Amino acid sequence: MIYKAIKYIYYIYFIIRHWEFILLRALYSFIGLIATPWLTFLKFLSISSSKFFCDMNLVFHRCYICLDVNSHLKNMPNIKQIPPSCFEFLSLLKNNNEREWFNDHKIAYQKEHTYIASFAQDLLDLMNTHDVIETPSGKKSLYRIYRDTRFSNDKTPYKTHWSGSFKRAGKQRRGGYYFHIEPGNSFVAGGFFGPPHKI
């Protein structure tokens, strides 16, 4: 599961890094002007099927692109695994989502949080081999487990998932990555807001 999560993060990185090319590809597809050289180039890049939403100021077009980057992942270094106890703690917290229980199990929470921070640090180090991330550490990338219940009808005090994000460095890169770890609902996401309409 962790390998798949890292693989999907790599997909998102590839899309963010090459968004101009992907946007051009979507535009050519939209107006029906796909030339043979483009197809040859796409085949060379091994682009076959993943989902990407292209947002332009005047042209809104949904295109589905899949990125086959298995060859790029063969030499990927080992990354720390998330132990099952991290998921078990979340399941227990979901069934006992109250402050008294959490305070009684604070030491267990801190132990599992250390595992997640270690995983996030390895993931950050790996991302920095392909991108430039300004998030200073894996621990700093993690979101607090405490929920903001001020404007919510759901007053349960704690989140039942681990999550974090990495911000890309610089105004030109913009954007970032997000990871969400939860029993039966783990996923990764990424992107940036407001791409310019001029390419």
Image (tube, rainbow, N blue to C red):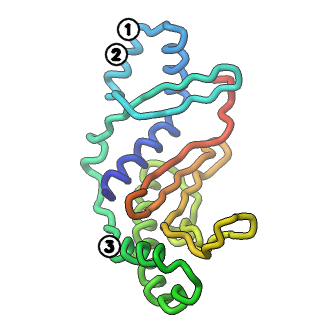
Residue occupying image coordinates x 34% and y 16%: 40
Task: Kindly tell me whether residue 92 is visible in this rendering.
Answer: yes
The reply to whether dot 2 and dot 1 touch (C-beta < 8 Å) is yes
Tell me the mark number nearer the camera, choosing from 3 and 1: 3
**Which residue is tagged 1?**
36
Residue corresponding to mark 2 = 40
For the view shown, which residue lies furthest in the right direction? 151
The amino acid marked with disc number 2 is Thr
Give me the residue at 49% from left, 33% from top: 52
CA distance for labels 3 and 2? 43 Å
What crowding class fits label 2: few (fewer than 14 Cα within 10 Å), some (14-19), or many (20 or more)? few
Residue 16 image point, x, y percent: 52, 39
Depth check, front residue: 81 or 136: 81
Give the residue type that dot 3 points to.
Pro
In the image, what residue type sits under mark 1? Answer: Thr
Residue 21 visible within the image: no
